[in-house]
Amino acid sequence: MRVPAGWLQRRLTNRWWRSVAAVLAGALPALAFPAPSLWWLAYVALVPWMLLARSARSGRRAALDGWLGGAGFMLAVHHWLVPNLHVFILLLAALLGLLWAPWGRLVRHMLGGAPSAARAAAALVVLPSGWLMVELVRSWEGLGGPWGLLGSSQWEVTPALRAASVGGVWLVSLLVVAVNTAVAVLVAVESARTAAVAGIVVCAVAVGAVAVWAPRPESSGFIRVAVVQPGIVEGVNAAERRFARSEELTRALDGRGIDLVVWGESSVGADLADRPDLARRTSALAAEVEAPVLVNVDARRSDRPGIFKSSVLVAPGGPTGDRYDKMRLVPFGEYIPARSLLGWATSVGKAAAEDRRRGTEPVVMRLPGGDGPRIGPLVCFESAFPDMSRRLTRDGAELLIAQSATSTFQSSWAPEQHASLAALRAAENGRPMVHATLTGVSAVYGPRGERTGAPLGTDRSAAAVYEIPLARGTTPYVRFGDWAVHGALAVLAVLCAVEGVRALRRPARGLPVPPARRAHGSAARPGR
């Protein structure tokens, strides 16, 4: 059934209908991420939102469209947090959605009314830069971290992964938003369609050039890694029974020629210094399978106060001394920001009853044996931060490892979304990455971001062995860092400068104009 254009226009002039439309338009891009994984939708998913903001009657209304759309996007991308945060998720979505208010106003500023071809062409650069600033600000750990960056939706698209190796996920986001902007111009600005088509062609050529000429990781051998995923273990003595199940699965790897065994986040529920029996059992496993075991301890440390989440490497002779304490914590899940003010969140959801402590620096571990590869561990959502894996790579890590646990969100999109982030980190750094979880999805990606072996889904309690290609060399992203972000900042700085100059040249509104002087008289006294 065809909806009359007049009917839709009347609905959008009503502020309540328009507000609902903004929320829905903002939520649409969430379908590009796992589990739906409609990656192609990302290239047009922003168009309805942009057309709505463009048509706003005022800059204030465009800002409101941006705010509501941002709230819809945040709610859709993080909907799986509802069981933990309940109604509090609505407040968080509303607060984070405010970040898109300036972007909504910017859309109207660049595309509102009947923009010239030059202005529409400039929008192809300005609007992606504005979007990237929103992603950059919300990537701060205290605001929830970089979960749901638009470029992350392209984790299984080879050309996009090649672009990530040059400019990180930031460059991919820029390109995706640029295509959305071009499509919006094609739909709404007839006089600038040539510029829009040119913009799409430029994006395609740029991605093609990167795919052909960007340096590729050079092979440097293989490593055999086993991922142990015990599955959901709940109830009385869950930590002890989880350890026993992981122990059972690890023991079954004997004779498989393993170089490293990786357990998931919180796989050990007591500090190994306080529980020498657990340390002995783990080192016995390492001796039995002839490979070190990387466990993750979620417990109070014996040598300092507080609870830490720590990656600990255990060799046949016992813990090697290599230990990484998680540095970036999940807001509300592992600590409550401004607990004195927001501590009530523990009464409406599963927020952290006690703040965990932070580590102070990343750690690169050398596998026992002298010439073994060096590994760079991350814990949980630290795999979402591009700068952390880049730092580990620059420090010499040859294999990136993320230890995670998403058991609370088993029936949601979260496990697959989390696993997909490892593909981006692998491609950015030219290093393979292992994403090991307690309950799935566990997955492994090669140095180009390609999937290696079959993942372990959320329905599995198993151990899997992966032969992972190692690589050497330095990607442009590792070498030059977040240059795409710096470029976006420069674009917005130029825009502000240009608009500032125009404002200075524009006559001020409402100021009285002094009467013109006459050489031979005045209006009051002609002839004098």
Image (tube, helix red, strand yellow):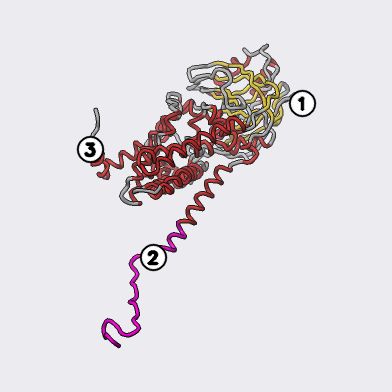
Task: Tell which tag, 2 or 1, sits nearer the viewer.
Answer: 2
Q: Where does label 3 land, which residue?
A: 7
Along the polypeptide, which appears first: circle 3 or circle 2? 3
Region rendered in magenta: 499-528
Along the polypeptide, which appears first: circle 1 or circle 3? 3
Along the polypeptide, which appears first: circle 2 or circle 1? 1
Q: Which amino acid does label 3 sit on?
A: Trp
Spatial separation of the CA atoms under disc 3 and disc 2: 40 Å
Decide: few, some or many residues near mark 2? Use Cα within 10 Å; few <14, some 14-19, many ≥20: few
| Image side of residue 70 versus residue 136, left or right | left
Up/down of 58 relative to 132, above or below: below
Q: Where does label 2 land, which residue?
A: 507
Q: Where does label 1 land, which residue?
A: 370
| Circles 3 and 2 in contact, beta carbons < 8 Å | no
Which residue sits at x=39%, y=36%? 75
Taking the view exactly as shown, the residue that stands out farthest to the bottom is 528
Q: Mark yes or no: residue 98 visible.
A: no
Secondary element under disc 3, as helix, strand or loop, is: helix
Residue 253 in the image: state x and y as whole percent.
Answer: 63, 14
Q: What residue type is labelled 2?
A: Pro
